[in-house]
Amino acid sequence: MYNPYRAEREHEMAPWREKLNSIIFGAETKSGRCFDIVLIICIIISVLVVMLDTVDSLGQRFGVYFFYAEWFFTILFSIEYFLRLICVRKPSLYCFSFFGVIDFVSIVPTYLVFFFPGLKYVLIIRIFRLLRVFRILKLAEYMGSAQVLLVALANSRYKIMVFLYAVATLVVVFGSLMYVVEGGQAGFSSIPQSVYWAVVTLTTVGYGDIAPQTPIGQAIASLMMITGYGIIAVPTGIYSSELLKIHKTDSLNNQACPDCGATGHDFDAHYCRYCGHPLEI
Amino acid sequence: MYNPYRAEREHEMAPWREKLNSIIFGAETKSGRCFDIVLIICIIISVLVVMLDTVDSLGQRFGVYFFYAEWFFTILFSIEYFLRLICVRKPSLYCFSFFGVIDFVSIVPTYLVFFFPGLKYVLIIRIFRLLRVFRILKLAEYMGSAQVLLVALANSRYKIMVFLYAVATLVVVFGSLMYVVEGGQAGFSSIPQSVYWAVVTLTTVGYGDIAPQTPIGQAIASLMMITGYGIIAVPTGIYSSELLKIHKTDSLNNQACPDCGATGHDFDAHYCRYCGHPLEI
Amino acid sequence: MYNPYRAEREHEMAPWREKLNSIIFGAETKSGRCFDIVLIICIIISVLVVMLDTVDSLGQRFGVYFFYAEWFFTILFSIEYFLRLICVRKPSLYCFSFFGVIDFVSIVPTYLVFFFPGLKYVLIIRIFRLLRVFRILKLAEYMGSAQVLLVALANSRYKIMVFLYAVATLVVVFGSLMYVVEGGQAGFSSIPQSVYWAVVTLTTVGYGDIAPQTPIGQAIASLMMITGYGIIAVPTGIYSSELLKIHKTDSLNNQACPDCGATGHDFDAHYCRYCGHPLEI
Amino acid sequence: MYNPYRAEREHEMAPWREKLNSIIFGAETKSGRCFDIVLIICIIISVLVVMLDTVDSLGQRFGVYFFYAEWFFTILFSIEYFLRLICVRKPSLYCFSFFGVIDFVSIVPTYLVFFFPGLKYVLIIRIFRLLRVFRILKLAEYMGSAQVLLVALANSRYKIMVFLYAVATLVVVFGSLMYVVEGGQAGFSSIPQSVYWAVVTLTTVGYGDIAPQTPIGQAIASLMMITGYGIIAVPTGIYSSELLKIHKTDSLNNQACPDCGATGHDFDAHYCRYCGHPLEI
């Protein structure tokens, strides 16, 4: 895998910076691998600390330990951030990269919590740092898979936008209808509330905190549920067919025409479809 | 994009009407684009006003502002409707088009609200006017996507009808069965109520306002849930395969090779892939 | 469409029986079409009567009308059943056909209701008679669609059985686990009850009448929900791929080899794949 | 079907052991089939006994019968386990096979229940023994289907891992957000609790035991439901396309024509479809 932070490490950098760089940013050497594993364990524990601190029964008993743990991990991550800065070739490149921003946002809130106590929960963003876990697993495989999933999503963006507009319209119209029909009782106290109910129903979540009471309301709700149950086929169909198109492109002949260089021929093609030159099969 | 209201604007119309037409109906010029953006913002705010007016706490405090806002937007949209009428070449064509009817229904209720107060909520129909948002985005892309989704839906209409009949039958039969089994208690007070429960269960919405209490009822309900969980595969399968068929047809050329008669060439092929003979494209 | 009851009507039957047969069993003539429409309306009303009779508020007010309506329809359907019997060429064939049995079960319960009051609800089975509605619509289209759906279901029966066994095992194991974890409180009062909860959760129905209270129970439940959310992909995938396989077979060349008569060649095949004889394309 | 326990039974084993082996491990002879059916009935009854024993009303009345039934089945299964051990060629091979372990775990808990009463519920594991039911049905068909489903699952493991990581991140981030927004009331009492709610919502289960009360909370929840409703398309799309790839690979012959080198022939093709040359099958 190409790694922009390490790309040109073979010249100009002091040996200890090179070493540090290979440990912190790389995963090929044994020490690099170890560093990544320790880092991931620290991240998981620090996220758990933030989460468990909010549980009343645990917070009262172990609150002080959680407090120390939070500071311990914040200082640890600060040192790590500092080391990353000094061993990377172009600190500005790292600072404004996706991981650079995440790493920064993962340590700052603890320092600012004296001024803005609510910031504490921003630390949960550390979970994004876990993306690094894919580096010690077979990164290329995961990256390839993620890319296929994202490309299929990108290809189907227009269809998905049209679908979302249709869902939004359905939800607003049905929600307003239910507000009129249910006459403002039983949780349908306003149109926004009814629209919320419509989202809960159409997506088949169905909390049940708001439910129609009148026969006509139940009939409309039934219609809506069947609609929601049926149109779940639309995003699924869109996504499946995009994924399949990507697979099909994968299975094309990757031989270039010897005459004009065109690619993308079918496996069973005998002649280049652009210039008519025979292909070497 | 072909636009029926503007098609022949280059002759017979007074210059100011032509100008107005290009602003109101077009989206190519800068002023046309601006007009569309302002219009969309007005539509969104006016829909929000209708929705928020029904929230008690807001309605009491800002009720009078909402009232003025509603009249403001209604008068604005009335002027817009009037301008559309006078600058279009054939007003009758516009009046009875989809957008013409929507535009009309979006302003009339405010005027009639003195006589029929309930009509107020019909204003929510303004959300359909938002379809114009696709005009300032890449309209052709969205229209193409919407058309593919609708064609796939139209192609699978017979299969979907059969599926809906099967669902309706399942729901009525299971609903009646549960009415008999649960003995009219716990919400299963009548067959229509039980059928409503069956819809809620089969579509995996599951409000929980009505739930079986007896062991036999729970066993039947379990059976039904697994059925509902499984048959969601049917509309999804139907829709996915229709979408894929459209993709396949789209990506194939139905021209036969003039030399060897082979078919199934790609759209961008210039030469027959079996005999190398040039194709007439 | 081939109709077994009418197949040989051109000989041996008295003219009035032939006429009656074409009205009752056929849908080509105007009178046959009329008969079907009237019949379908009667079926829908009679099903509604059975359903609405169970609604307390309606049952008390209109009970006596419902009682007469039920007898009216039962007598009407009895006459119809009798007419079908006398005008069909082979009564025994009709009697034991799918529709013959449904027609019989749709009238008998009213007569037996004096002895077994519970039988009344069996009348809901009349909804299956509505299948005749497809005869006045484009029957062939619907039958073709229904057949494709059923063939895909039949082809995937082994995969579906394996899937259902896996679901049953998951549900029993998770249900028992939750019974142990939740310690018999909060609705998890016995293993069958917990298994019922597991079905409700795995199928994403989620009534909420039984819900885990302990942190460990909620963790297990979360795991189960994600499993259920993920494995819904399995039946959908099975069914989609079966439907696509059927479509692919449909799109094969239906030309038979002029030499050996083999069919099922691809559209782009030049030679019979069984005997090597050139195909006429 | 190849059966490792019976593979070499034709030599070295005493006749009675051979006979016993064919009855217990085989399903071809009539007595082997009978044994399997009786065994499956015993397994089902013994699982039901464990389940029903936990129902209070039944446990009090029939508790003593359940106790005897449990011992009866445990002794029966112990004898069966012993017989399997003595008639198999290599007992160690059987002991550590999947079925060997399941069979052992299915009898031990009853003996240990004096020391660890909680072990009783481990008996539910007997349900895995039911896998043997596929042996008396058409085993090969089911095994083939199960294998296709598992291979598709294995092929899509990287994509599924990426998807699960995305779901986990969504759930933690949204859960924390809701904890902050809902201010610790209405069930959102801690981050882990809020994350549990997020799982319930994203998977469209929707118990309703925890539901947002504030308008902003409901807006975020709506967003999350639509996300959950949409991304269910991802695992379905992944799985569908993997299943289709397996079908495609299965139905194509990877032999090239010896004359023209064309590939992609069907498995049952005898001649090249492009040049008519016989294929070597």
Image (cartoon, coloured by chain):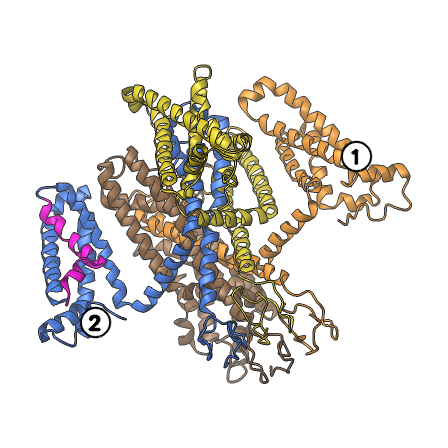
Chain colours: A orange, B brown, C blue, D yellow
Residue at x 55% of width, y 31% of height: D96
Image height of C72 relative to D191, above or below: below
Looking at the rendered image, the quarter that the C terminus of chain A falls into is bottom right
| Within-10-Å neighbours for mark 1: few <14, some 14–19, many 20+ | some
In this rendering, would B254 be left or right of C9? right
In the image, the segment drawn in magenta is: C89-113
Image spot of residue D248 (x, y percent): 54, 60
Image quadrant in which you'd find residue D17: top left
| Spot occupied by residue B197 in the image (x, y as percentages of width and height) | 31, 43
Q: Is residue A204 visible?
A: no
Amino acid type of the residue tagged 2 in the rendering: Ala
| Neighbourhood count class around disc 2 (C-alpha, 10 Å): few under 14, some 14–19, many 20 upward | few
Q: Is residue A41 visible?
A: yes
Residue lying farthest to the top in this orientation: D115
Query: In the image, what residue occupies the spot 10% across and 71% down?
Result: C17
Q: CA distance from mark 1 to mark 2?
A: 84 Å
Chain to which the residue tagged by mark 2 belongs: C
Queried whether the magenta region covers residue D115, the answer comes back as: no
Q: Nearer the viewer, mark 1 or mark 2?
A: 2
Res A31 label? 1
Relative side of A245 to A170, left or right: right
Magenta segment's dominant SS is helix
- The residue type indicated by label 1 comes to Ser
Q: Position of residue D171 (x, y in %)?
A: 55, 39
Q: Nearer the viewer, residue C46 or A86?
A: C46
Q: Check if mark 1 and mark 2 are on a common chain.
A: no
> What residue sits right under mark 2 in the picture?
C7
